[in-house]
Image (cartoon, grey):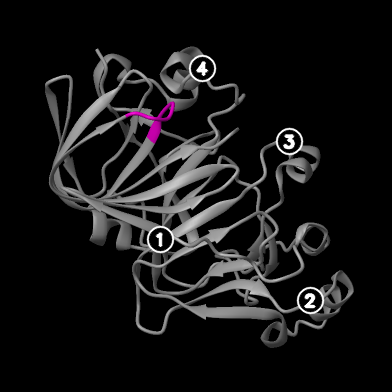
Amino acid sequence: MAEPLFLQSQMHEKIWGGNRLKKEFGYDIPSETTGEYWAISAHPNGVSLVKNGLYKGFLLDKLYAEHRELFGQSKSPVFPLLTKILDANDWLSVQVHPDDQYALEHEGELGKTECWYVISAEEGAEIIYGHNAQSKAELRDLIEAEDWEQLLTRIPVKAGDFFYVPSGTMHAIGKGIMILETQQSSDTTYRVYDFDRMDDQGQKRELHIEASIDVLNIGAPANSSPASLALEGIKTTLLVSSPFFAVYKWEIDGSVKMQQTVPYLLVSVLDGSGSITVDEASYPLKKGDHFILPSDVKAWEFTGNLTMIASHPNGH
């Protein structure tokens, strides 16, 4: 029977994490410094578990390996995407991710292009998005001089903002921001600067200056230009379409019937409640749910008041 695959996933504690994953979404969190919920993931560092139906109890990596028909017979050797919710109770490190070629050569996994939908942001919250160096030599000079004021580009953010962050982009999520991140399935991060903070062992976290300089892009990052279409029952916004993924925001008000036009979809409910009906079977939806609509789900109907982020792989 064709059905959505609802997922249970792993929390990750972080030096910069907080407790809003519990406050905002009602999740069970391991501590008051919980930074990330890997909501849809087949990455070895945090694999999701199917909660319902025929494949109940399957880990997503095993399901992808053994039932590729659910994923359009995807040729990607690993499940290609990862959806996270991040609670930045403090600044994340200033960092950069490598592209596929560099990451496969040096880390043995995919590179990491990602994007952020801002769920909430405190007054005055900022991100770092890009840098001001005009050459690799200037980049090195400013990093070695620790002239962060001159080097880093700060941008104010608010709820509903969206940022496309290709591999090679200098970036950091600022204090007081909660985001939904869609990314390639990778956990490789090169830290450029970590605000000189100490971990709970009294040690500064490792920096990766040479690797960062290797992979950082020169020139300002180009953000996407979201495009919206309002139809009866739904406002759909294409947030980005990149070589790695397409990401949409769906705002449901009432009911809308939809059809599968891609091999499969990853869906996260950010607000509201309602239901999804597939082959006359109805499944309740609430804020904080995450599910996959596999290839055998050809059509469905959403009912209720729901804000969701959906994504699918592009060309990989």
Badge 1 crowding class, 10 Å Cα cut-off, few under 14, some 14 to 19, many 20 or more, is many
Neighbours of disc 3 within 10 Å: few (<14), some (14-19), many (20+): few
The main secondary structure of the magenta stretch is: loop
Question: Which type of secondary structure does the marked residue at label 3 adopt?
Answer: loop
Q: Earlier in the sequence, mark 3 or mark 4?
A: 4
Q: Nearer the viewer, mark 1 or mark 3?
A: 1
What separation in Å lies between label 1 and label 2 (alpha carbons)?
27 Å
- Camera-side residue of 256 and 206: 256
- Pointer 1: what residue? 179
- Quadrant housing the N terminus: top left
SS for callout 4: loop
Q: As shown in the figure, which amino acid type bears the numbered disc 3?
A: Gly
Is there CB contact under 8 Å for labels 1 and 2?
A: no
The residue that mark 3 highlights is: 108
Decide: marks 1, 3 in contact (CB < 8 A)?
Answer: no
Q: Does the segment drawn in magenta span residue 200?
A: no
Q: Position of residue 14 (x, y in %)?
A: 49, 59
Q: What span is colored magenta in the figure?
A: 260-265
The local secondary structure at tag 1 comes to strand
Q: Quadrant of residue 209?
A: bottom right
Mark nearer the viewer, 3 or 4: 4
Q: Earlier in the sequence, mark 2 or mark 3?
A: 3
Q: Residues within 10 Å of mark 2 (few under 14, many from 20)?
A: some
Mark seen at residue 20: none
Name the one closer to the observer, 286 or 162: 162
Read off the residue under disc 4. Answer: 73
The residue tagged 2 is: 143
Distance CA(mark 1)–CA(mark 4): 31 Å
